[in-house]
């Protein structure tokens, strides 16, 4: 396994070097809109701890991420009146990981509706901003 690379996109977002649509933040995690969403309301939960993936994450970071994932799952399900959620987490290239900073995908799901393919196409910022606002509003009502 390679060493953690502090130049990854999530590290840059955490340092404020790149913009993001933040929907949630606590002392240990941040949740942001995925800029290439596979579903409307697709968010990423990212620990503030510098860790590559589940293999090198400290136990407390994993705990914080899991608790934030639960919070965000409830919020996106409510915000989008979804039937359920899909939660995904990838480790190393062979496991599908592309950005090497631990993160968890949380996507609202609807019966009979497939996830959009991951094409690399970025969503319009105004759409992401509107989705972020819906999730923030849902978080206030949890």
Image (tube, grey):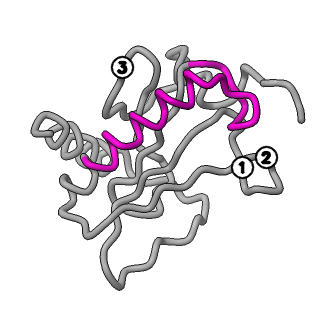
Q: Quadrant of the C terminus?
A: top left
Q: Residue at x 50, y 16 (%)?
A: 16
Residue 135 among magenta residues:
no
Badge 2 vs badge 1, beta-carbon distance below 8 Å: yes
Q: Which mark is residue 92?
A: 2
Closer to the eye: label 1 or 3: 3
Q: Residue at x 55, y 18 (%)?
A: 17
Q: Position of residue 70 (x, y in %)?
A: 36, 43
Mark pair 2, 1: CA separation: 5 Å
Mark pair 1, 3: CA separation: 24 Å
Mark pair 2, 3: CA separation: 26 Å
Tell me the quarter of the picture where residue 55 sits: top right
- Relative to the observer, which residue lies in front, 82 or 63? 63
Tell me the quarter of the picture where residue 109 sits: bottom left
Residue for badge 1: 97
Residue for badge 3: 26
Q: Quadrant of the N terminus?
A: top right
The secondary structure that most of the magenta stretch takes on is helix
Residue 57 among magenta residues:
yes
Q: Which residues are magenta?
A: 49-74
């Amino acid at each position: 396994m390679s060493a953690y690379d502090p130049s990854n996109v999530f590290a840059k977002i955490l340092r404020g070097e790149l913009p993001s649509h933040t929907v949630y933040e606590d002392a240990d995690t941040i949740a942001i809109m995925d800029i290439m969403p596979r579903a409307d309301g697709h968010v990423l939960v990212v620990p503030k701890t510098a860790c590559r993936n589940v293999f090198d994450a400290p136990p407390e970071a994993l705990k914080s991420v899991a608790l934030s994932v639960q919070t965000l799952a409830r919020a996106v399900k409510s915000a989008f009146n979804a039937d359920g959620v899909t939660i995904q987490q990838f480790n190393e290239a062979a496991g599908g990981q592309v950005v090497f900073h631990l993160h968890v995908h949380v996507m609202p799901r609807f019966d009979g509706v497939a996830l959009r393919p991951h094409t690399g196409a970025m969503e319009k910022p105004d759409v992401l901003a509107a989705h972020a606002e819906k999730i923030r509003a849902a978080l206030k009502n949890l």
